[in-house]
Amino acid sequence: MKKLNRRDFMKLTAGSGCALAAGLGSSQSAFAGSLKLQAGGKDFSPATGKERQAIPTACWQCVTRDSMIGYVEDGRLVKLEGHPDSIRTLGKLCAKGQAGINQVYFPDRILHPMKRVGKRGEHKWKRVSWDEALDLIVSKLKPLRDAGTPELFMYQYGRHKASQAATMYDFMQAYGTGTIGNHTSVCEAAKWVGQESLWGGMYDNWDYDNTDYVVIFGSNQFETHTNHIPTSQRLIRAKVDRGVPLYVFDVRLTNTAAKADQWVPIKVGHDGLVMLAMCNVIMNEKLYRKDHFKFMRVTADYKASVADKITAVTNNVAKYTPEFAEKHSGVPADTIRNIARGFAKAKSACLVTYRGTVMHYHGADQERAAMLLSAITNNLDRPGGRVMGVGAGWKSPSSPRAKVHKTLHVKDGFPGEAAYPTHHVSHQVLPLIKDGHAGRPKVYWWSCYNPGFINGDNKELQAIMQDESIIPFLISTTIVYDESSQYADLILPDVTYLERWDWEDMVSANQIAEFYIRQPLVKPLGESRCQGDVWPELAKRMGFELAYSSKEDFVRQSCEMTPGVREAGGFEYMKKHGVWHDPDAKPNYGFYETKVDISGDGVILDDKTGVYWNWKKAGVDSQAQAKSQGYLNTKGAKKAYIAQNIDGTAYLAYPPNTKFVKAGYLDFYSDNFANKGLPAFPTYTPIPEHQKMADDELNLTTYKVAVHTHSRTAHCKWLTEIKHDNPGWINTKTAAARGIKNGDKIKVYNDMGEITTTAYVTEGIIPGVIAISHHLGRKHSGVYGSGQTSPTSGGAAADPDVKNIWWKKHGTHPNTIIPNASDPISGTQRWMDTVVRVAKV
Amino acid sequence: MGTDWNIVAVNAKSRSDIYAMLALVFRQEPSEALIEELRGPRLSGAFSEIGLELGDSFYNESVSTIADQLALEFSRLFIGPGPHISAHESIFTEVDGDTGGLWGAKTVAVKKFIETTGLDYASGFTGLPDHISVELEFMQKLTLWEADKWRQRDRMGAEYCLSIQRMFLQQHIQGWVPKFCNAVIAEAEFPFYRELAELTKFFLGLEEQSLATETAA
Amino acid sequence: MSDNKTPDINRRKFLSGVSAAAAGTAALATPRVSLEAAQSKAPRWVMVMDLRRCIGCRACTVACKSENNVSLGRFRAVIQEKTMGSFPNTKKAFLPLMCNHCEGNEKDGVPPCVKACPEFPGKRAKFKTADGKTIRYRTGATYKRPDGMILIDKEKCIGCGKCIDACPYGVRSFDPFVKAGGDPSKQAADKCDLCAHRVDNGVEPSCVNTCQGRARIFGDLNDPNSEVSKLVKAHNLAKADNVLLADEGTNPHVFYIDPDNILKSLYTKRKKGKLDHFVDQIP
């Protein structure tokens, strides 16, 4: 361009400006109204006064979903703090919650619908309008529905809970697909399956406010936990204020272990064995409590006496002597004895387990061992013990169900892979689709999920997504470009949790349900849109109506429908206060002891199991037929369960409210398991891969730290600043044997491939293990997440804080060398079973 | 001292038209109509006279091809996903340690500035309040208002408006748009955005000069 | 409450205290604590860190970043952690660190950072106590307010960095985004100000508000009934073992409840001229 002067510019506009401004500009104006300038000589001064608001809402960084207050200044979110009125969180918020602001305003956020124009993975995109995007989606989904094959539309989500899940399931019901995937198998499925086989569809909580003794296996409560803020503050308070003993079994010296009376290092995969050895001590030393035995079933016999059961449990755990456990687990026999005695003698005691315990081969059975230990000491659903989680029970509107409703069977793993995948096998969804025997969806839409990063074998899963011949159309709803959305055909800009409506229901730590909501603190940025607002719009375009017009409407209706909330003032009350609980509610304990009226029409006693059930409700033709085929042989009978006859009393006991067909007992002897060749009684089953390890091989374990979620916080600069590198924790001796010193560059490798990181040589991990956290090593996720400096200077690179990024490392991702492999019981991803070699580079 | 009211009015109107054009260019992917206009007889001559080289293909390819090309270029440069040049003042500036985010303190300042003049953001507008096209369109509105005042022989009104223009240019536009333009010039694949970024930078530089030295343009 | 205001108050978001009056919030109990100042004399704001309760969760670190828009590369509040002992008897401990808001040595009552500030003593200022009594004090670019807060006036700061060097705890750094008002070619010094903008409005500091372990207890040491006074008394915290670097004679006013001797085993004094230990990073 020439060096221009003012006159040159005037040429530009000679006679043309009008056409430009009038013909093209007006329809796209950013403004409404007209200038109202004062014509006098008065100084112009933009308003400087600040309007502040405090708005109650809820977090979503992790599944804990704390109630909080958002402080908004001039339409801009400036601070988040815990909600002081919440009985769950008591006004506290964690590091991730505090960094929630970063989620809304990080510079790489996706703000518009984007359509792929290059090849998958070529990163070529074109902005499209929402109209165009929705039309495109309808052009894919409507034909599938019209052709009677709605199941060929698959939806998979990472974090959808409460009304975010409810609105989605409602739409899918109305559309007709049951091909809906989740992410629970990479999270904790084995824990739930183990529990469901015993006490039904429960979520355990630990009554720290009342407990007298705490033993934790493989759970890092103080850094990161499924119900972190409500539970961990109560635990540290119990410890310091009341001197409650705390023992932590872990491979690694976690923050939780650091605050314990004792960190008990334990070899990978032996938590269940040590628990069984504790049972052994308790049974042999007669430290058990009889109270819960009558609700337990420990042999094939449904009618065994308590004395028989005590003998049977004693016999079943006889082989797990503390010495036997020491040999395999590395935990000294005396330590096991001491903790077992303390646990059994305490007035009440909590046994806590999480991923370290259950993300293994037979992980579900390890959870059963934890339940056994709790049951024989009468610490199940008792004050101070391992209790049944209590969450809010919302009512919500539902839309008419589609006439054709089908499911593609790609959710539960390969044939024979998992016996009870009641929470599905999400990490095998893409491999199964590739396999094709169960069919392939034509449209695959994922949301708040990053399958190419959070599952095992990232390379293979990403290759499946990249291959257009496997799934022809991919949709990703996300706030950030990531390892999966890079292969999408259409990216939809999601709202952050700070810009949307929800009702929420996460469990309380004090056994009283808390109802709470999430409301937008600010208007959705750019063109981002909540999935709950997309569903009604999509439905309309496909010719059916949903029972709600927007997410806000869904939440409003739910507030007016839900008993308690409605009487308190419904939606308006919740908007103003954010939280509600029944002030007269009593903490929920021991519902298994509830005595049940069995006089109802159609209720009969099953001779074999002692179950009272309603044959009419079960859909059986006659009482005679019901009697002859029996409770266990009647399909649908568990839905007609009424009570369990125990010594002549009808107790509610533990109803079979999951996919497990069982009586009302805690099924420590499980026909379900026995029939599938799985251990009928909690058993120590060595992890196959670990039995044939060469001398120089190590166990790889992964973990979370306090400042990151698995995959959705890397772009939060305040968090990544604190944790941006993930060196491999390795014991001093293990490192020395390989000539590795602290800070050395190392490679971690196996048949799957190789990752490199640095060695963190420490006395804080058991020998024979390398532990690497699993948040980092991002390929995308913005400049803060991946550290990839922009090929275009500008954008995030123009961010003034980018030049202050002082860290050079961006970590590595262990999931690339961990295969997708399932626990044969639950279908849980076996994160902790991988075998690797480690060498200095 | 005689004022040729008509000349100063036309002058203001011309500046307004340039702001309008630039606002359009950065608002969104160019429509075929805009491309036709830009390479039409009324502008192509002026472009070539000032040495604005939009490239042969811009004039020769079919309008739909150009529209497709520029839509991709627009997304790649200004929207993402992935690294891009975010066209927002708050990304390029820092206030009180609040940095590098969308909807920052500067965004609020722009919004308040604009709203103080009586304008509102249109309900259908989904961009952020400190997007480059918003700031340019705001200048378009101001200069148009100024032109009206000259036409009405309201010197005080016109000069008052000029002072607001000066303030906005100094407090907001010139603090970041030149940096933004430099990034575009460095990264654009096609001449279109590179040349128009050059044009924008030069134009704003002239504006700043003349607003600083003259009362009446 | 007093009407004392920090000089750069408008730079901040003072949230909870003000928000109670804002629209839609009347019904909310704001996270306000009772920060009643002692009558007639100024309060003496102090922090008690109960190390038994610190679980190393970093909520304080991030809350501080958010509350004060602390740029990348520096922190006003950090957690140090250290693994000690040998396997299997390994221990790990956490130590929250921040500005100690030192009283200064007994002779002149001026902490080293204030002493080092070329702009101190500057103009006189008035501090009003709860019952309306006026206390006069000297300001500076770094100065001590009568309620014990060590504050920075960035408008007066000349960016010389002498206070940064003078602080034995290394809690000070240059703010890359704020120019020193006294010499705009340099950057202003920055550090923890106990969230003066919140405290002046009757709200506890952000790190205290978010601390789930309740390891951080903030309050007025001049009020014998305050929780901090009771804790200082009950745990005998005024003795040298319960503050950092007692030998320096700085008379710190961040007290640690430390039955496990974490201060001794964990805390390392900054090396002269080095600030890099005041960064929070999880291994």
Image (cartoon, rainbow, N blue to C red):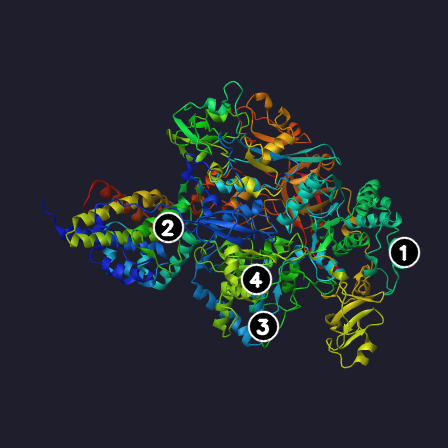
Question: Mark 1 and mark 2: span between their CA atoms?
Answer: 76 Å
Name which of mark 1 and mark 3 comes first in the sequence.
3
- In front here: A288 or C91? A288
Front position among marks 4 and 1:
4
Residue B130 numbered mark, or none: 2
Quadrant of the image for the C terminus of chain A?
top right
Q: Do labels 4 and 3 touch, CB within 8 Å?
A: no
Q: Is residue A548 above or below residue B144?
A: below
Residue at image coords 40%, 39%: C10
Do discs 1 and 3 belong to a common subunit? yes
Question: Mark 1 and mark 3: span between their CA atoms?
Answer: 52 Å
* Chain at numbered mark 4: A
Front position among marks 1 and 2:
1
Residue A724's quadrant in the figure? Answer: top right
Give amino acid for label 3: Gly
Front position among marks 1 and 3:
1
Residue B24's quadrant in the figure? Answer: bottom left
Q: Which residue is mark 4?
A: A565
Residue C281, position in %: x, y?
Answer: 58, 38
Give amino acid for label 2: Asp
Front position among marks 2 and 4:
4
Q: Secondary structure at mark 1?
A: helix
**Going by the image, does B164 lie left or right of C94?**
left
Residue at image coords 23%, 43%: B211
Do discs 4 and 1 belong to a common subunit? yes
Q: Which residue is mark 1?
A: A311
Q: Which residue is mark 3?
A: A176
Q: Secondary structure at mark 2?
A: loop
Residue C213, position in %: x, y?
Answer: 62, 41
